[in-house]
Image (cartoon, grey):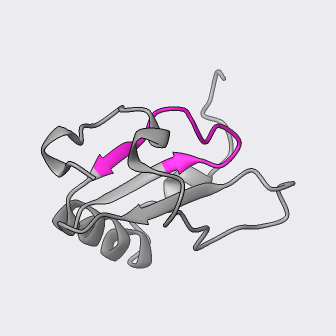
Amino acid sequence: MDLEHVYNGMPATDLGTEGWSKPWSGGNGGSCVEVMRLCDGRVALRQSTDPGGPALIYTRHEMETFIRGAKAGEADFLLAGPRAGE
């Protein structure tokens, strides 16, 4: 894989079909996030129901910051009910 041409929003299939995994999945009928660790340490994410759709590319530092924050409860607001007026 030519990492020089890896960019945010690229078709996930351009990263290949091997190496994608589902580190977390629930009772959602198979719809989940799949991840791939790139050889330069970046992480690609894609939607399992749209494997050819866009891949979001994050640096190791971005992923580490997100995971640490999620573990600390900083993302809990994402699980709250709808906002007033929605």
Q: In this view, does 58 lie to the left or right of 49?
A: left
Reply yes or no: does residue 52 show up in magenta. yes
Q: Specify the segment rendered in magenta.
A: 46-57
Task: From this view, report whether residue 36 is shown above or below residue 1.
Answer: below
**55 sits left or right of 25 in the view:** left
Identify the residue at the far left of this view.
4
Q: Is 45 colored magenta in this rendering? A: no
Quadrant position of residue 10: top left
Q: Quadrant of residue 43?
A: bottom left
Percent across and percent down for residue 75 are 44, 60
Q: Quadrant of the C terminus?
A: top right
Main secondary structure type of the part rendered in magenta: loop
Residue occupying image coordinates x 22% and y 60%? 62
Residue at (23, 42) in percent of width and height: 6
Q: Position of residue 66 (x, y in %)?
A: 32, 64
Q: What percent of the width, then of the height, locates residue 49? A: 71, 42
Q: Which one is nearer the viewer's eye here, 46 or 84?
A: 46
In the current view of this chain or complex, which residue is farthest to the front?
A: 1
- The front one of 85 and 48 is 48
Q: Name which residue lies at 62% across and 29% down.
A: 84
Rendered view: 64 above or below 53: below
Q: Which residue is drawn at 33% across and 70% down?
A: 69
Q: In the rendered view, tell whether residue 79 sits above or below residue 82.
A: below
- Total labels drawn: 0
